[in-house]
Amino acid sequence: MHTLNDQRAFASESMIRLMRLALEAPDLGSAVSPTLQELVDRTAASGSAYFHSSNQVPTYHARAAAGALPEGPAMDAIMAHGLPADMPLMQALTQTRLPLFFDDTATVPEAAGFPALGVRSLAAAPVRHRNGSLIGAFLMHTFSPHAWSSDEAGLFTAVAETLAGLTARLAAEEDAVAAQESALRALGLGLEFKDHETLGHTDRVTDLALRLGRYLNLDARTLQALRWGSYLHDVGKLAVPDQVLLKPGQLDAAEWDIMRGHVREGSRFADALGFLPPSAHDVISGHHERWDGQGYPNRLAGVQIPLVARIFALCDVYDALTSNRPYKHAWTPEEAQAELAAQSGRHFDPDLCQAFLELLQHGSNDLQDS
């Protein structure tokens, strides 16, 4: 066990680290997990976890954990379905703003259900929305009865209060981002309601782009920008006249000039969205550029084309090839992959093309969640 001075120093260090995390963390899990681990390291706790509820759903799901968690079917059910809002512990947390400490869960009704998990001592701290409602809970536990010391209680309280403030802020930001994302996706889908031949294209190509991005180990912020740019990649087509956009058969030269103008129209639209990340804008403005410099609108070549645009171009063309259009039948996946390979180093970044073909041909264990 560390000295009181050590634990006070840790609490102070935690505050500084959490302030940095508040500025840098892309999500709740990455903000909370490191501190949960240090909490386990510096107390008698066997494990620690954060459970969070969003969108008024009366269930609290695990968003971060550290140390040893209970095992068995009951815990598997909690990890899969969350803690119900009507369980005694969560009800108790709605009535307090201070952490609760239970030295022996078998002796207190508020901890009902935890002895069956093998949890014998428990500490729990509430996290509240700015409107006062309970949106989460920090827990730490042991597998045998344990009298939480005043030092441990003080440390947990200090860290939990700081984490609670950070988590509430990040949760509010996540809600705002989710609202923005829903609006962006709706804009992207708006084109599909106008041009029924492209129904499903936005979601399919976004899914492909995210899978390739994860295959390339892009960070969370870049993946978010790629997703938002994918939603809006063709938003400029809303400005294309219906007689051109919906024309059956091939376009003539003048009509192609009008159609190509959708990129600049989309870029102008993106400029008006102050919250749109630059990389999302890059997808919109650059997904029709070509590796050999023969694309449009700016005839960029090679790595002058932003990475996210090069990624998206592969996915966009693949989906177009494998989908029915008024002027062509859908190609088979094998035919489309052969065409991508033929265009490697011409239309497409050769390294990204190789990675995308590997992804299509072999898949990846990391690609289950799109």
Image: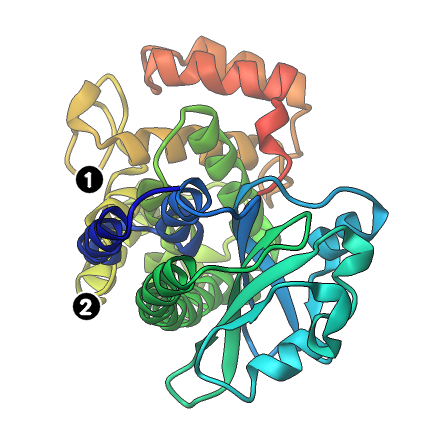
Residue 269, percent from left and from top: 24, 64
Left or right: 314 in relation to 345 = right
Residue 15, percent from left and from top: 22, 58
Q: Which residue is at a point 49% across and 20% down the rendered structure image? A: 356
Left or right: 84 in relation to 127 = right
Residue 150, percent from left and from top: 40, 64
Real-space Cα distance between discs 1 and 2? 19 Å
User: Which amino acid type corresponds to the residue marked 1 in the rendered image?
Assistant: Pro
Q: Which residue is at a point 49% across and 45% down the rendered structure image? A: 206
SS at badge 1: loop
Disc on res. 187: none
Left or right: 74 in relation to 364 = right
SS at badge 2: loop
Disc on res. 297: 1
Mark 1 crowd level (few <14, some 14–19, many ≥20, 10 Å Cα): some
The image quarter in which residue 103 lies:
bottom right
The front one of 298 and 249 is 298
User: Which amino acid type corresponds to the residue marked 2 in the rendered image?
Assistant: Ala
Q: Is residue 17 visible?
A: no
Kindly identify which residue carries mark 2. Answer: 272
Mark nearest the camera among 1 and 2 is 2
The front one of 344 and 119 is 119
Give the answer, above or below, for where 47 lies relative to 165. above
The image quarter in which residue 53 lies:
bottom right
The front one of 45 and 33 is 45
Mark 2 crowd level (few <14, some 14–19, many ≥20, 10 Å Cα): few
